[in-house]
Amino acid sequence: MSILEKLNQLKRTLRMGWLESGIPPSEAEDVAQHSFETTSITILIGDQLQRKGVEINLGRAIEMAVIHDWSEAIMGDLSREVSLELGEEIKNDLEEESLEELVGELPDGEKYLELWREYLGGESIEARLVKSADLLSILVELINYRDRGWGNEQLNEIWDNVRGELATYGEEFAPVGELLVELDGRYSD
């Protein structure tokens, strides 16, 4: 199977957090949709940051956003329960092994692995931008579900957890903080 066929699987890999929260499979976001939205948010916020004079390699950030969940083409999207049982280190090792399996034979395979490791480490401004976009995508999708009638305690718990994690990025990146205020208003409506 070619890498394109494997990546195509992301369009059929549903996000487990939504399924665990009672979102029907027919309505649940898939990994490809999430990756597209994360990349779009990365571009929009990155452009704003550059206009404000922030030095950021937006091309690198965009590549990072596109590949941040590629490992799920091999291993699927793990449920929160499984992720907690495995622990962060083992989960990260499994993701890296899956990504190596996916891109290992490509001429630029090591480049993709380095981008993913950079994202995971969160040390660069590009990695933190992508992580904030990843989290913002979750909040946007959560509002979408709530607006369509799927509000429940599990979704509120996801909101609280993601909102808390995103707060530090809102302090670093003004556009993220502004979006967070807007999303808070939407979620509390």
Image (cartoon, rainbow, N blue to C red):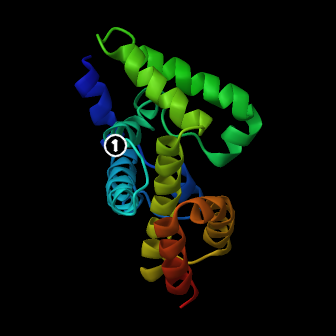
For disc 1, the marked residue is 62
Q: Is residue 147 visible?
A: yes
- Residue at screen point 37% across, 47% down: 35
On the image, which quarter does residue 44 sit in? bottom left
Of all residues, the one furthest to the front in this rendering is 53
| In the displayed structure image, the side of residue 176 where residue 87 appears, left or right | right
Specify the quadrant that holds the N terminus.
Answer: top left
Residue at position x 67%, y 39% from top? 83
Q: Residue at x 27, y 34 (%)?
A: 8
Of residue 61 and residue 89, the one placed in the foreground of this image is 61
Does 185 appear above or below 60?
Answer: below
How far across and down, in percent of the image, does residue 86 sit?
Answer: 73, 32
Locate residue 87: give its quadrant. top right
Residue 3 lies left or right of residue 150; in this view the side is left
Percent across and percent down for residue 76 are: 48, 35
Q: Residue 187's spot in the image, x, y percent?
A: 54, 82
Q: Height in image: 33 above or below 1? A: below
Estimate the x, y position of residue 60 in percent, counting from the top left.
Answer: 36, 36
Horizontal arrangement in the rendering, residue 128 relative to residue 161 (left or right): left
Report helix, strand or loop for mark 1. helix
Give amino acid for label 1.
Ile
Q: Is residue 149 visible?
A: no
Label 1 crowd (10 A; few <14 / some 14-19 / many >=20): many
